[in-house]
Image: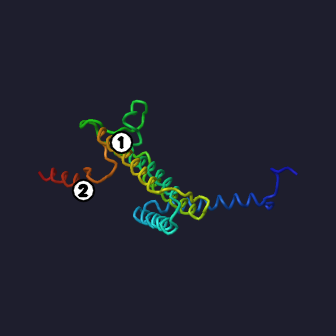
Amino acid sequence: MDINTADAGDVTPSGAFCQWTSSASLSFQHFLDKTTPYLLYRWIAFFFIAVLYVVRVYLVEGFYVISYALGIYLLNLLIGFLSPQVDPELQDLSDGPTLPTRETDEFRPFVRRLPEFKFWYSITKAFCIAFVLTFFSVLDVPVFWPILVFYWVVLFTLTMRRQIRHMLKYKYLPFSFGKQRYDGKKAASSESEDLLL
């Protein structure tokens, strides 16, 4: 009997497992899609998971290498979150959206290299994985943790200094506060005033 002509009732264990994982993956993706508009609740859930991890590491008094690796990964994600999708230094090489470099340039919204939802999802997943790793004693490598903290602070300071210089050089701000907003209400009210005159 040919494998391709097997009956639908002949389900192998591996086929059932693949079907179950596919169904679980679709359900999880549906859950993520439904949580997308709830920004505040997503970040509250992240902070709860992060506090759980910090408390676990504090109580166990170990897993500093895992925490250091987590810190390096978070720094990498933060740089992606703060960086524009198209680097102005390399804009001549690509055809994507660019940042305005002069006052006369038209306004273009800031497009992140790593969008907020992917940033949230990545750091939440990283904290969950790190939390699970703290249950494996083989990963608790003895290390003098103040050196790791000092090295991470130096790395963070140098990286953020470079990122802030890049922001100042190309005059972009990756956050929405402090930027001028245009409402449809102001435009509509000014049009009605023009009609009255």
Q: Which residue is mark 1?
A: 162
- Residue beneath disc 2: 185
Amino acid type shown at disc 2: Lys
Colour scheme employed for the rendering of this structure? rainbow
Mark 2 element type: helix
Residue at 41 percent of width and 52 percent of height: 150
Rendered location of residue 108, percent (x, y): 33, 42
Camera-side residue of 57 and 105: 57
Distance between the alpha carbons at the discs numbered 2 and 1: 40 Å
Quarter of the view holding residue 87:
top left
Q: Quadrant of residue 37?
A: bottom left
Residue at the image position 36 percent from the left and 43 percent from the top: 163
Q: How many callouts does the rendering have?
A: 2
* Label 2: how many Cα within 10 Å (few below 14, some 14–19, many 20+): few
Tag in front: 2 or 1: 1
Q: Residue furthest top?
A: 92
Residue 64 x %, y %:
50, 58
CB within 8 Å, label 2 to label 1: no
The disc, 2 or 1, on the residue closer to the chain's N-terminal end is 1
Q: Nearer the viewer, residue 58 or 19?
A: 58
Task: Pinpoint residue 181: horizontal percent, then vertical percent.
Answer: 26, 52
Q: Three-letter amino acid code at disc 1?
A: Arg
Q: Is residue 142 left or right of residue 174?
A: right
Q: Secondary structure at mark 1?
A: helix
Determine crowd level at label 1: few under 14, some 14-19, many 20+ residues with C-alpha closer than 10 A. Answer: few
Left or right of 192? Residue 62 is right
